[in-house]
Every structure is written in structure tokens, then in C-alpha cells.
Amino acid sequence: MKRRQQIISAFIFTAAFLSATFSRPEARASESVAAEVFVILASDRDGTIAPALARISALRQPPFNGFRSMQVLQKSEIELKKGEPVTVTLPNGRRLMLKLKQQMPDGRSKVQLSINRPDQKDYLPLLEVIAKQGEPFFVAGQKYQGGTLVIGVGIGKRVSNG
């Protein structure tokens, strides 16, 4: 009986040791992820498209390909921690709220976002997106300075240079 307890104790010690040894920092880091929020002023008037934006394939697809000018107004690099909302103030005074819900095993991230005005009804109450690392997703529709604000969110690595 004593031998059996020694074996069980050795097994528990080994399991605990292996768990501590192989719980990589990367696994713990998956509870947070770097992100970039970039706000674009897009217009259907003739103009230019910023070179960094011209390289993003999603902006060359409908409905974004109808815009004839696009300029980056603002960029913010943020860190999303699981369950903790991060707020970015937009050029029109509204607030974008992002929250990391889950890091998926395949590298994608489940993110919640909303856009609101302080003390007023939400413009975009709540949207949940599953984003692939390095491929931004976009939310558009708010009128601003004769154009439309397009908000891009890239999860996991920097996606724009301009």
C-alpha cells in the first residue's frame, strides 16, 4: 500500500512539474493581443487613396471599392486583454469600444465592438466579429466632413503603414 502511495505521489509531482514546465508564456499571452485601430475618411469624390490603404484587399471589394478617395485620419495601437474593454475616441467624438472575448486555437480572435456617443443612444450597439490575425475588418457608415468614416481594426499585428 505504501508503494502505491509513493507511485501516486510521484505521478502527481510529475504531472505538476510537466504542467509548470510546458505552460509556455505564449499560452498565457493568448489572453491578450496587440491591435491597431485606424480611422479612414472615405469619399466618393475624386481624390487619392493612401498607398497603405490601397494594399488592403478588403478595401478593394464592395462596398468600399466605391470610394474614390481614402485618407487615414487616425491610428491607435492598443492591447486587448480578454474581457477588458478598450475605448478609442473617434474624430467625430463618438467612442469605439473593443473587447477581446476569446483567442481561438487557429489564431483568430473573437472581438466585440460598439460605437456610441457619450450620454446618447448607441450608433452601433454591439457587434461580434471573428477576426483573422493580420487581416483587418471594417465598420463604416458615419458621416464626417463631407465623407464617411471607415473604421478598420487589425488584430494580432500591425496592418497599415500610412
Image: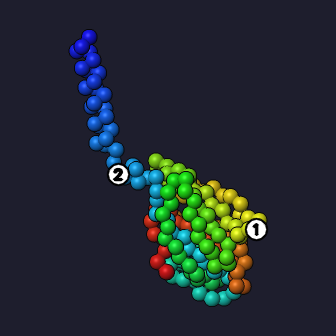
Asked whether, in this view, residue 2 is left or right of residue 143, the answer is left
Q: Which residue is mark 1?
A: 120
Which amino acid does the dot numbered 1 rest on? Answer: Gln
| CA neighbours of label 2 inside 10 A, class few (<14), some (14 to 19), many (20+) | few
- Type of residue at label 2? Pro
Q: Badge 1: few (under 14), some or many (20 or more) residues near its Cα, within 10 Å?
A: few
Residue 47 placed where, x, y %? Answer: 63, 88
Q: How many marks?
A: 2
Q: Is residue 61 visible?
A: no
| Residue 119 appears left or right of 31 | right
Residue drawn at x 24%, y 20% as measured from the top left: 6
Residue reaching furthest to the bottom: 47
* Residue at 53% over, 76% down: 75
- Give the residue drawn at x 77%, y 65%: 121
What is the number of the mark on residue 25?
2
Mark toward the start of the polypeptide (1 vs 2): 2
Residue 48's quadrant in the figure?
Answer: bottom right
Coloring basis for residues: rainbow
**Quarter where residue 124 is shown:** bottom right
> Looking at the image, which residue sits at the far front?
119
Helix, strand or loop status at disc 2: helix
Residue 147, position in %: x, y? 70, 82
Q: Position of residue 43 (x, y in %)?
A: 68, 82
Name the quadrant of the N terminus. Answer: top left
Using the rendered image of the protein, determine whether residue 21 is visible from the camera's viewpoint. Answer: yes
| SS of the residue under disc 1 | loop
Residue 104 or 62: which is nearer the viewer? Answer: 104
**Which residue lies at the image location 55% right of the left edge and 53% below the top edge?**
83
Q: Is residue 35 above or below residue 8?
A: below
